[in-house]
Amino acid sequence: MERVHIGSVIHEKLKEQGMSVTDFAKALHCNRPNAYSIFERKNVDVELLVDISKVLNCDLLSIYQNSIPKPDCIVLIETNERKIKEIQSDDSIKILYVQKPAK
């Protein structure tokens, strides 16, 4: 999955809701040029993205987060357990609990 251009997503959501750029800017306590600059951004500060999500009443943070490729990784943790357990928390992360070697 390719990372979304979050500014374009914001602009599209704004149009879908029929909100004017002027009203959008007022809700964010900024001016129209600043609002238009948001539409050009590939990345947006998390705090601003949360504020925009509130204004547009949609979860833009999840949309952006879900577009970020997740690397495959394995985390190994030593435990005192007798058996090995594999817990799959989601498709991209596997957590393995491995028995601690005897001394």
Image: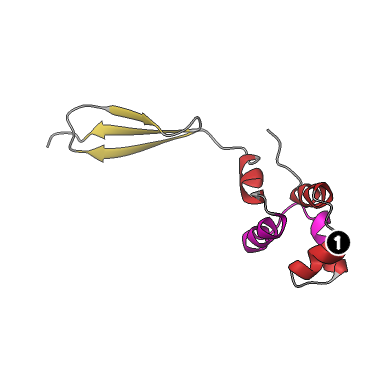
Q: Position of residue 55 (x, y in %)?
A: 71, 60
Q: Is 43 left, or right, of 90 in this rendering? A: right
| Residue linked to disc 1 | 21
Taking depth in this image into account, of 51 and 82 the one nearest to the observer is 51
- In the image, is residue 41 part of the stretch drawn in magenta? yes
Compared with residue 52, is residue 81 higher up or lower down, i.e. above or below?
above
Q: Is 94 left, or right, of 12 in this rendering? A: left
The residue located at (66%, 62%) in the rendering is 51
Q: Position of residue 64 (x, y in %)?
A: 66, 46
Q: Tell me the quarter of the image containing the C terminus.
A: top left
Q: Residues within 10 Å of mark 1 (few under 14, many from 20)?
A: some
Magenta range? 36-56
Taking depth in this image into account, of 72 and 89 the one nearest to the observer is 89
Q: Is 54 left, or right, of 79 in this rendering? A: right
Q: Position of residue 74 (x, y in %)?
A: 42, 34
The residue located at (86%, 66%) in the rendering is 22
Compared with residue 48, is residue 67 higher up or lower down, i.e. above or below?
above
